[in-house]
Image (spheres, rainbow, N blue to C red):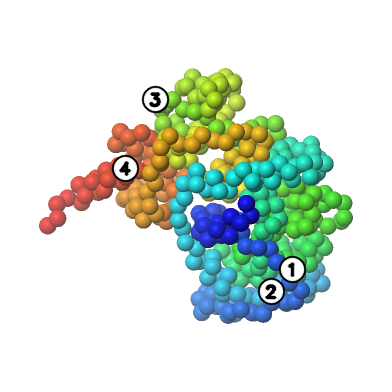
Amino acid sequence: MRSSLPALRATLAAIAATFSFASLAKAQFAPAPAPITRAPHVATVPSPRAGSCHNGQSFERFLADLKQKAAAEGVSQRAIAEASPYLVYDQGIVNRDRGQRVFGQLFTEFAGRMAATYRMQNGQQHIRTYAAAFARAEKEYGVPPAVIAAFWGLESDFGANMGNLPTLRSLVSLAYDCRRSERFQGETIAALKIIDRGDLSPSEMIGSWAGELGQTQFLPTHYVNYAVDYDGDGRRNLLRSGPDVIGSTANYIASGLKWRRGEPWLEEIRLPQDFPWEQADLTIKAPRSKWTSLGVIYPDGRQLPSDNLQASVLLPMGRNGPAFLAYANFAAYTEWNNSLIYSTTAGYLASRIAGAPPMRRPAGPVAQLPFNEIKELQQLLVRAGFDVGKVDGVLGQQSRTAIKAMQLKYGLPADSWPTADLLARMRGGARAQAGPVQ
């Protein structure tokens, strides 16, 4: 099944644009090379506008100031000197960041590829191989092995594909660029701290183009704050040590993402035809007893526990697609990566690794609006007074909320899924509001 990875690279690189900035490179599946042993040459020079947010400072002046900030935060001059040959600007990294194309993909297509049987089985095998580390992590942090293994598989295919670019070059280039300068200045300083405490050398820092490191793709700030030495060698090595990857990922999920010990995260369900679709929303939380009273059951017909455990009904493809109960722990997935497709896939893969059956396929094809029509729908929603965030053709939570409101207005099933019917009605409404052409 490894042969399927090259075909995914272009797809996932495009989907990465729908992810949070911290996850832009998580879907890169390029082969991981051996660490470079010498400083890379400067590939390109900054564009004329690159320093506009730094009072026109040259990159060299900006870098000198950044090194001073790092020293003020406790980074040693030794570590700064070791890293300096790698702190070079690459306009190609910035171009890549700014040039990401967005395209949509149905959840069932994405999950079918990324939560495929081979990856589920690989996750189960890794749990057996590292049984002691997984057991320790669950005892100390309360995070089940399947949850850790799912992220491990999705982020790097268990270390096979961690990226192939010098991390320091990526970070400092994005720090000098004006789009997210402050954030990446902090990430660059965090990378220097990783070097300073002896976890990785500058030449070992090879990862994604957005500066993430290791087998579960940690940003340097997460590496500094949550990486733990689980193999006892005195280093936190998330590139080479399976136990360190397991313990560190569990620590981040538990401490950074507030995982709730002993609680579920995502379960597939079946909804009745007369379900009140407007109730299917991650912002609406209710006890399972309420969902039971509305006719929600498991896919095999079993009843849900009629208890007070809070959950939301999640329809990643509207009422004609799969349905899930998303529990409080599902928030850890959306915090890890705010793409609904990615987070739902990660939760689903974890459930599969833990032993859940494959999800039911939709009874028929689920129509999806093309990118340009989703963008047009967003524009119409903005004209109707809704805040959808960025009008970018990406179906985020704000867009879904606005879509549901308009579905209710037009008497359509309010499942937050954009349809040709809704678009046609909104086009008609916009024409009526504009009045006759003079």
Task: Report the label total.
Answer: 4
Residue topped by disc 4: 422
Q: Please name the residue that numbered disc 3 is placed on.
A: 274
**Residue at the limit of the structure toward the left, as seen here:** 438
| Residue in front for this viewpoint, 238 or 48 | 238
Q: Which residue is mark 2?
A: 87
Q: Is residue 129 left or right of residue 269?
A: right
Q: Is residue 299 above or below residue 190?
A: above
Q: Nearer the viewer, mark 2 or mark 1?
A: 1
Alpha carbon of mark 2 to alpha carbon of mark 1: how far? Answer: 16 Å
Residue type at tag 3: Asp
Mark 4 vs 2: CB contact within 8 A? no
Lower sequence index among marks 4 and 1: 1
Contact (Cβ within 8 Å) of mark 3 with mark 4: no
Give the quadrant of the C terminus: bottom left
Sooner in the amino-acid sequence: mark 4 or mark 2: 2
Label 1 sits on residue: 35
